[in-house]
Amino acid sequence: MQYKFEGGVDFYAELAKLSSSGAGEVAGEAAAAGEAAAAAGAAAAVAGAAGAGEAAEAPYELCNISCEPLVRHNVTLVCGHKFNYEPLYHEIKSQKKPRQGLAFPAKHSKLKLNVRQLKCPLCRNIQHFILPWIPLYTNCPKLYGVNTPKIYSMYLNKCNHILKYGKNKGEICDKQCNDEKCNLHMGKIPKEGAEYCPAIIKSGINKGKICGCAVKQNGFCNRHNK
């Protein structure tokens, strides 16, 4: 059955056109919304992966007292907890020395630290050694039972100098010390800004190696300044 209006307009044909047009618009909007959602999901995934990567690549460890990055002279206790030297020094000082208005150790305390002991600030584990004295830290002078006497002091590091002579040539020194190198090899650390002779040694046991002596004139040492 057909219903035609004035001018020969077919009512059902026009209705069909309107229906198909509406469905197309709805489909287009749905597709656009789907594309937007997919783009947002992809962006979120990329951001999440980047965040996870940054967290996994954290470049430093933190001191368990100050929550600041560990610096050159950091201390690792037997229990595994790590601290920067200065905040740990002041913590041990408070463990060993009386505070104003208080007696130390407290009368009710069952645990008393002797001169060669310290207590981990985090887990309260007793360590049977004290800190070494590090002259670099002017705010941490020698204090009995904290960083002196030396006989009870721990070492913070092991010497990483590679031996160049003797039966252990090529091996790491590995002697206990409080810096990158032990006292014997401390003089082997190149001074900042220093210049060294680049000449190649032509004879002897070091043949083929760089001289490495201090520069005196014209960019060479006295021996190779010719």
Image (cartoon, rainbow, N blue to C red):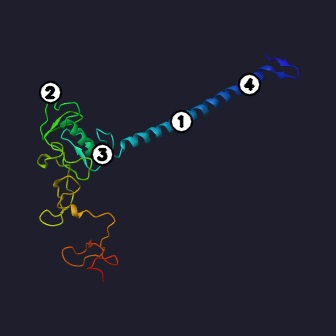
Q: Nearer the viewer, mark 3 or mark 1?
A: 3
Q: Are marks 4 and 3 in contact (CB under 8 Å)?
A: no
Q: Distance between the residues labelled 2 and 4?
A: 94 Å
- The residue that mark 2 highlights is 107
Mark closest to the chain's N terminus, 2 or 1: 1
Nearest the eye: 20 or 94: 94
Mark closest to the chain's N terminus, 3 or 1: 1
Q: What is the count of numbered marks? A: 4
Mark closest to the chain's N terminus, 2 or 3: 3
Q: Nearer the viewer, mark 2 or mark 1?
A: 2
Q: Is mark 4 on a helix, strand or loop?
A: helix
The image quadrant of residue 24 is: top right
At 44% across and 38% down in the image, what residue appears?
Answer: 48
At 14% across and 39% down in the image, what residue appears?
Answer: 117
The residue at the far bottom in this view is 226
Q: Distance between the residues labelled 3 and 1?
A: 39 Å
Mark closest to the chain's N terminus, 2 or 4: 4
Which of the numbered marks, if any, corresponds to residue 40?
Answer: 1
Q: Is mark 3 on a helix, strand or loop?
A: loop
- 216 to the left or right of 167: right
Q: In the rendered view, tell whether residue 206 sits above or below residue 79.
A: below
Q: Distance between the residues labelled 4 and 3?
A: 72 Å
Mark 4 neighbour class, 10 Å CA radius: few under 14, some 14 to 19, many 20 or more: few
Mark 2 neighbour class, 10 Å CA radius: few under 14, some 14 to 19, many 20 or more: few
Mark 3 neighbour class, 10 Å CA radius: few under 14, some 14 to 19, many 20 or more: some
Where does the image place residue 198, in percent across and percent down from the top left? 31, 73
The image quadrant of residue 129 is: top left
Under mark 2, the amino acid is Lys
At 22% across and 54% down in the image, what residue appears?
Answer: 179
